[in-house]
């Protein structure tokens, strides 16, 4: 039976919890027909990184950025306003407007969910953008939710949370909170009565290839090597984007994707004409009270065909001087980024070069953490560290300039970030790798790797194919150079 939780000192917020009686995918499938559904999907590592998943739909407000234009949408009034206000100060103001302390003890209770696209970095660093936004993706797309479903995978519980926002009047907010809670109860009730269908077979059309030719990618790597030799940079993350025709349901693709390649920072987002599906293993930024951490990944090997081969590849990754050097450079970059907003002397590295293994790859991962200076806001922390250093290079600004020069199209959400911003100031955001975008009956996915002084252009190209393997397994095909 549902159990109500009394929230001391908060008469408007309403919360219930029930046993996890249905598969999370079955619960989310009941939200798909509602406006702007989201699922922040922790598909593995429930003890450490992926204890909670969150889902919801029908936001009360939206904030969208496209170049110099910022759009706000009042979903309750049905009004839309375009302006040239800078995105980050506007976001800071909205988070302050609805700021509230968390009262139920959950990581996320109400706030914004969406993505920060890679090109949003142009609003932080002042250099010209020359890449083409051929997919017409917004630079950022955030929806603000007053009611959501939280799943505690460790304790196998489902929490239904309703705050009554954005209503100011206490009585009206209490009424709205009760109505929204009843809606969430109906969602979970229906999910428990409908069996989850089997994973569907997917039908794809022709492959549309990459935004690079094979020769073009090798030439771009050679140019980066020349920049390194000239002393401009130490490392650049170069990527290429693949595309395949897909007229099926994005939801069917995501169900297969998360089943074949589970990860702790997965996501399914509806953002107007784009559906975003991510199975990221990498955390960009976690803030909890005054604690902040980032977990850069740098260094990859494929999984072996048997236990012996798999262990050999894992050991090869650990002992690789190239991967160690590349990884240390990014850890130093992240220490510098957090140092901009941290209390003096608090930046530290509690985990260094540990190996994490996923369905298709082994990764080298570190954790960089600090305590936030009291004068710094959540948005300050994002501005001083975005985009993540593991997917740009070192030094960051010069690497971003070279990426813009060499990559022909905008990255969009790829290597940006997806996650939540709670109205308390707490956040958890991924690095949007292992991420697909469905747009106009086409599925796009992008992969890359760090180029350093001793990189071999052909091996770097092959590494992008290895990283694409989770997508290609879902497609049932393997791309060829």
Image (cartoon, rainbow, N blue to C red):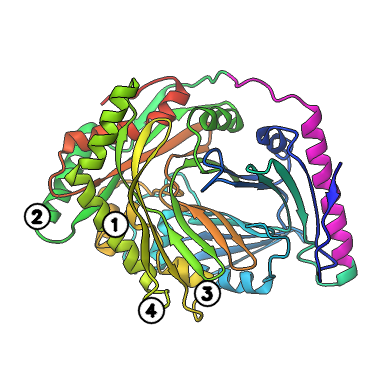
User: Real-space Cα distance between discs 2 and 1?
Assistant: 19 Å
113 left or right of 60? left
Query: Looking at the figure, which quarter contains the C terminus?
Result: top left
> Looking at the rendered structure, which numbered label has been put on residue 330?
1
**Helix, strand or loop for disc 3:** loop
Q: Which residues are magenta?
A: 172-200
Q: Which mark is drawn over residue 79? A: none
Q: How many marks?
A: 4
How many angstroms separate mark 1 from mark 4 (CA)?
21 Å
Which image quadrant: the N terminus? top right
User: For numbered disc 2, what is the local secondary structure?
Assistant: helix
Whether residues under marks 1 and 3 lie with C-beta atoms below 8 angstroms apart, the answer is no
The residue singled out by tag 3 in the image is 377
Cβ atoms at labels 2 and 1 below 8 Å apart: no
**Considering only vertical position in the picture, is 150 above or below 63?**
above
> Which residue sits at x=53%, y=33%?
258
Q: Which residue is mark 4?
A: 344
Give the CA distance from mark 4 to mark 2.
35 Å
Element marked by disc 1: helix
Residue in the foreground of this view, choosing between 265 and 96 = 265
Disc 4/disc 3 C-alpha distance (Å): 16 Å
- Towards the viewer: 122 or 232: 232
């Amino acid at each position: 039976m549902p159990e109500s939780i009394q929230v001391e000192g908060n008469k408007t917020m309403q919360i219930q919890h029930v046993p996890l009686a249905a598969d999370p995918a079955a619960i989310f499938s009941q939200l798909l027909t509602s406006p702007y559904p989201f699922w922040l999907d922790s598909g593995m590592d429930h003890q450490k990184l992926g204890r909670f998943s969150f889902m919801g739909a029908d936001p009360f407000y939206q904030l969208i950025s496209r170049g110099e234009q910022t759009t706000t949408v009042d979903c309750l009034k049905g009004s839309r306003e375009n302006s040239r206000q800078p995105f980050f100060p506007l976001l800071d103001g909205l988070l302050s407007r609805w700021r509230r302390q968390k009262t139920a003890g959950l990581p996320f209770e109400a706030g914004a969910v969406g993505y920060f696209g890679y090109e949003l970095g142009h609003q932080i660093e002042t250099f010209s953008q020359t890449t083409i936004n051929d997919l017409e993706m917004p630079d950022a797309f955030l929806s603000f939710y007053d009611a959501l479903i939280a799943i505690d995978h460790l304790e196998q519980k489902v929490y239904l949370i309703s705050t009554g926002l954005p209503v100011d009047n206490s009585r009206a907010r209490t009424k709205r909170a009760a109505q929204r809670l009843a809606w969430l109860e109906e969602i979970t009730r229906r999910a428990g009565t409908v069996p989850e269908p089997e994973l569907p077979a997917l039908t794809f059309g022709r492959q549309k290839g990459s935004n690079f030719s094979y020769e073009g990618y090798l030439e771009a790597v050679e140019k980066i090597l020349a920049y390194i030799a000239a002393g401009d940079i130490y490392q650049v993350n170069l990527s290429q984007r693949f595309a395949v025709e897909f007229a099926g349901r994005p939801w069917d693709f995501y169900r297969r994707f998360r089943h074949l390649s589970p990860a702790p920072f997965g996501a399914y987002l509806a953002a107007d004409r784009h559906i975003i599906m991510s199975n990221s293993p990498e955390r960009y930024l976690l803030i909890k009270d005054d604690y902040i951490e980032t977990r850069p990944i740098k260094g990859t090997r494929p999984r072996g065909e048997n236990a012996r081969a798999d262990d050999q590849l894992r050991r090869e990754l650990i002992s690789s001087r190239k991967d160690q050097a590349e990884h240390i450079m990014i850890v130093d970059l992240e220490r510098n980024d957090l140092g901009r907003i941290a209390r003096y002397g608090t930046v530290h590295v509690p985990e260094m070069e540990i190996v994490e293994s996923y369905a298709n790859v082994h990764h080298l991962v570190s954790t960089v953490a600090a305590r936030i200076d009291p004068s710094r806001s959540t948005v300050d922390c994002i501005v001083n560290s975005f985009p993540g250093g593991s997917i740009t290079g070192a030094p960051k600004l010069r690497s971003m300039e070279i990426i813009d020069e060499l990559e022909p199209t905008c990255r969009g959400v790829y290597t940006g970030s997806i996650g939540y911003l709670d109205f308390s100031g707490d956040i958890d955001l991924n690095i949007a790798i292992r991420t697909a975008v469905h747009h106009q009956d086409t599925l796009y996915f992008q992969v890359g790797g760090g180029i350093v002084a001793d990189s071999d252009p052909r091996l770097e190209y092959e590494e992008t194919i290895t990283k694409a393997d989770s997508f290609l397994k879902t497609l049932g095909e393997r791309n060829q150079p």
